Image (tube, helix red, strand yellow):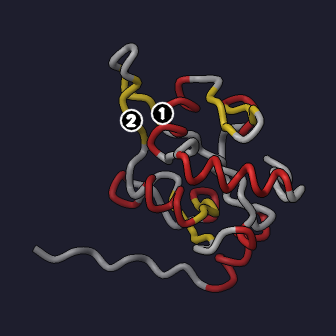
Amino acid sequence: MSRKPRPYINRDLRRLVASRAGYLCEYCLIKESDTAFGCAIDHAISLKHGGSSEVSNLVYACGFCNRYKGSDIGSIFWETGEFIRFFNPRRDSWFVHFVLNESLIKPRTKIGHVTAQILGFNDANRVQERQILIQLGKYPDRPN
């Protein structure tokens, strides 16, 4: 079984996506310069689910958010058993779906809940990282 080659995202497109995001992860809002793993280009809707490599489907994501999200597009909201799509920075407002409560990113909606859960927003190490950045005045910078 052969896999399709990954589409090439050229340097100019990468720069456009990074600049549009203000060099912040569009999911957890960490600055690229404040994370050891940097940021990468993510497909909001993965290619295997019919997404494209057009700028309107590309997101800037830190290494953790990018890895945890993978090609997923949503998850189960266990309270109701519903499949709920993830937060999409190209169509959603961060403030509608999340609120920063000290160093925790608290979900406000089902979309926020499944996104925070699967992307590990409040894993202990990530919360500790945010606590340090908050103390240094480096987090949050500016959500969309």
Distance between the Cα atoms at labels 1 and 2? 6 Å
Q: Nearer the viewer, residue 68 or 131?
A: 131
Q: Nearer the viewer, residue 34 or 132?
A: 132
Q: Are marks 1 and 2 in contact (CB under 8 Å)?
A: yes
Q: Which mark is residue 75?
A: 2
Q: Is residue 116 above or below residue 20?
A: above
Location of residue 58 by image quarter: bottom right
- The secondary element bearing badge 2 is classed as strand
* Badge 1 amino acid: Val
Q: Which of 23 and 33 is in front in this view?
A: 33
Q: Residue at the spot x=41%, y=24% of the render?
A: 77
The residue positioned farthest toward the top in the image shown: 80
Label 2 neighbourhood size at 10 Å, few (<14), some (14-19), many (20+)?
A: some
Residue 75, horizontal then vertical, whole percent:
38, 35
Q: Name the residue under label 1.
A: 114
Sequence-wise first label, 1 or 2:
2
Judged left or right of residue 17, residue 45 is left
Residue 92, horizontal then vertical, whole percent:
67, 38
Q: Residue at the spot x=58%, y=71% of the render?
A: 40
Location of residue 129 by image quarter: bottom right
Q: In which quarter of the image is the N terminus?
A: bottom left
